[in-house]
Amino acid sequence: MFSLRDLVTAYLENESPRKGAQERAADHRRAELWLRVFGADRDPTTITRKAWIGFQEARASGAVDARGRPVAGRHRQPVRARTVQADRLWLRALYRWARARQPEPATGHPPSEPLRGCRVPRQQNPRRPLATVERYRAVRAVSDEVRMEIRWRGRRESARSYLSEVLDLAHYTGRRLSAICKLRYCDLRLGSGPYGSIRWPPETDKLRRELVVPVGPEARTALD
């Protein structure tokens, strides 16, 4: 019988080494998690929705840790939906990888995913890393050294890049780099307000809102 241990072992031996060190460590951690939760000798096609829901509730409440080990009540640390989602998506990737491989006579056909259609928890307000002021200042101190190549009428010239101005706009407007890079000249309202304003189009806003926001002197300097 093709067991969950066989599937996980094959993945760790053949696919995981292609990844970076951090991702390889995460693969081994999640392999330990699923083998402990569902059982190493289990037929991977027999995992039920009930078992998945039980795991989801236990993991979210902190009843099991990141390696599938039970945790006593007073030591439990609940996790957010995004953490549970990441573990579930790894299991999905494991099955998809198995289905993409050629069947091997020793193990038979790779299993299909039994949890297809099961709802994966989603985080309504995911936490994202924020750049500190100290980090901005450290990068800004050397950003003028970054060069770019300008091509014009068959000529190539080296010039200071616009990285410094982009960093300044990101820092003083609070907008994402992708939104800043998609600005057009028609989005600038340089005569509106003491230092001008920027129209942020809905296409670059996460909530799809159009906003016209005044800028301060530092942002205006970057725009100029």
Image: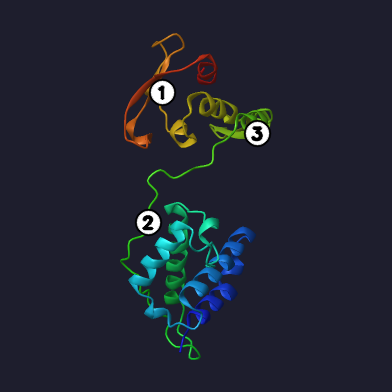
Q: Mark 3 points at which residue?
A: 146
Q: Name the residue under label 1.
A: 185
Q: Which of marks 1 and 2 is nearer the N terminus?
A: 2
Is the residue marked by circle 1 packed among few (<14), some (14-19), or many (20+) residues within 10 Å?
few
Q: Mark 2 points at which residue?
A: 121
In the image, residue 28 above or below residue 166: below
Name which residue lies at 50% across and 64% down.
64
Residue contact between numbered discs 1 and 3, judged by CB atoms under 8 Å:
no
Is the residue marked by circle 2 packed among few (<14), some (14-19), or many (20+) residues within 10 Å?
some
The color scheme shown is rainbow
Residues at marks 3 and 2, CA–CA distance in whole angstroms: 42 Å
Residue contact between numbered discs 3 and 2, judged by CB atoms under 8 Å:
no
Residue placed most toward the observer, 131 or 48: 48
Residue 214 image position (x, y, % from top left): 42, 17
Q: What residue type is labelled 1?
A: Tyr
In the image, residue 166 above or below residue 84: above
